[in-house]
Image (tube, rainbow, N blue to C red):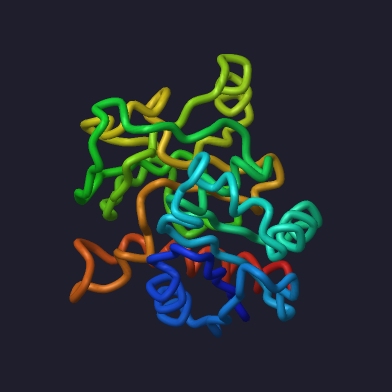
Amino acid sequence: MRIGVVTFPGSLDDQDARRAATYAGAEAVRLWHADDNLQNVDAVVLPGGFSYGDYLRCGAIARFAPVMESIVNAANGGLPVLGICNGFQILCESHLLPGALLRNDHRKFICRDQRLRIENTTSLWTRNFRVAQEITIPLKNGEGGFIADVKTLDELEAENRVIARYVDVNPNGSMRNIAGITNAKGNVVGIMPHPEHAIDDLTGPTTDGLLFFTSVLESLAVKA
């Protein structure tokens, strides 16, 4: 299986995402923001960082990159896509996911190991977790507060599309403690904390993040 990882100007965690894909057993493929060719990958990761310097709004310029037109079309056709941190912001700006990510309510950048509770194990990226499983992965953001109107929030709840919530403390003011969501099909997932930084005991606080990557590989294998 081939997992493509997009590099935008300002991406910081693209190499980490490729490493996580390789650890999970996939072939990691470099995708370039200015190239609309997805190179026949089986899944895509939009990594964390500060694409295009976060000018205008986080992810607002990245959504117009040539690669994103191909990703949006492929995602609408069922391609698995994971957006991490800035990637989550790009997914919202591209309307693949609802809502938006705003500046942290305490107006400060935060970097910490964060506890999450997994709420949904039906998405292609979370099938290897257990419902209500608590995990710890790093969180690092300045604009990570998830917001949406009440109707959208209620729809996400009713359709079981919240994949993870913050536990113990809400670090950024996200509505209803939401840390990640999925689209209705379950193939597009956005998450604010960084699973790619928790794949081994040497570099991460846990190995919990690796399950996002093994989940999509298992989902693809079942589908095949």
Quick check: 177 left or right of 180?
left
Q: Quadrant of the C terminus?
A: bottom right
Question: Which residue occupies 41% across, 76% down?
Answer: 15
Q: How many marks?
A: 0
Residue 92 horizontal/vertical position (percent): 59, 41
Dividing the picture into quadrants, the one containing residue 143 is top left
Question: Which residue occupies 41% across, 23% down?
Answer: 176
Which is more toward the observer, 98 or 22? 98
Which is more toward the observer, 67 or 117? 67
Residue 178 horizontal/vertical position (percent): 42, 33
Question: Which residue occupies 41% across, 43% down?
Answer: 118
Quick check: 36 left or right of 153?
right
Q: Quadrant of the N terminus?
A: bottom right
Can you say whether 2 is above or below 161 in the image? below
Which is more toward the observer, 74 or 78? 74
Question: Which residue occupies 21% across, 72% down?
Answer: 203
Can you say whether 132 is above or below 215 in the image? above
Dividing the picture into quadrants, the one containing residue 50 is bottom left
In this view of the protein, can residue 126 be seen by the observer?
Answer: no
- Which residue appears farthest toward the top when viewing the image? 150
In this view of the protein, can residue 25 be seen by the observer?
Answer: yes
Residue 18 horizontal/vertical position (percent): 46, 76
Can you say whether 173 is above or below 223 in the image? above
Residue 197 horizontal/vertical position (percent): 31, 65
